[in-house]
Amino acid sequence: MEKIEDQLVDSLNRVNFIFKNEEMITECIKAYDGFSILGEAFGPFEKSKKYKLKYFVALPFIENDIMKISLDEKCDNFDVQRYAISERDDQRLIQRDNPYFLNKIKEFKKFIEKDVYDKNKPKKGLDLFKSFNINIIDSRLSKMLRLARSELSVDDEHKLTNSEKLLYKKLSNLIKVWRAFFLSID
């Protein structure tokens, strides 16, 4: 029998896969001639020009210092701090513009780690990023637990990220079964 946790992890991995196929704006930091694989061409890229690439395509270019995430797309410790403060200060679930914003934070941690490893940023930035991310996750989880005890309104559903919708559905069903068990008369 498959565990609930395994099903949830599989679903969260699928959501993260969808995020990795989302396009984002990158900026070329080092000219590159490009290459072609399986009939798909990547490049050439000109220094200082912006390009819209799928995340999974952009990642190797970013890791090899050919591209960087555009300022329009960045998600560093300052952005995560703003998210964490707004989540802490508002007891209601906040709707984010990007339904994959938690996935973005998860994935963009790689860039902060790379900057720290390359000594382009101090380790304190990574520590703050991680701390603020924990605050965001815990705040949103607490809000979802409150929501899971009741029926989800259409407005509240729009405020959930795609990964949170998966968790909410599991939590809500489990809470209903647990509650019904103890309230039923045998």
Image (tube, rainbow, N blue to C red):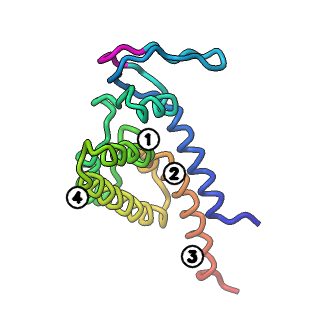
Q: Residue at x 63, y 79 (%)?
A: 181
- Disc 4 target residue: 89
Discs 2, 4 touching: Cβ within 8 Å: no
In three-dimensional space, the C-alpha distance between marks 4 and 1, rounded to whole angstroms, equals 21 Å
Q: Number of labelled discs?
A: 4
Which element carries disc 1, helix, strand or loop? loop
Discs 2, 1 touching: Cβ within 8 Å: no
Tag 1 or tag 3, which sits nearer the N-term?
1
Q: Residue at x 33, y 50 (%)?
A: 94
Q: Quadrant of the C terminus?
A: bottom right
> Who is closer to the viewer here, 17 or 166?
17
- Disc 1 target residue: 99
Tag 1 or tag 2, which sits nearer the N-term?
1
Residue 101 in sight in this render: no
**Labels 4, 3: front one:** 4
Q: Residues within 10 Å of mark 4 (few under 14, many from 20)?
A: few
Q: Amino acid at mark 4?
A: Asp
Residue 55 locus on image (x, y percent): 47, 32
> Who is closer to the viewer here, 122 or 94?
122
Task: Check residue 82 in the rendering and tell me which mark sits there, or answer none.
Answer: none
- In this picture, residue 39 sits left or right of residue 137: right
Magenta residues? 45-50
Q: Quadrant of the N terminus?
A: bottom right
Residue 147 in sight in this render: yes
Tag 1 or tag 4, which sits nearer the N-term?
4
Tag 3 or tag 4, which sits nearer the N-term?
4
- In this picture, residue 52 sits left or right of residue 175: left
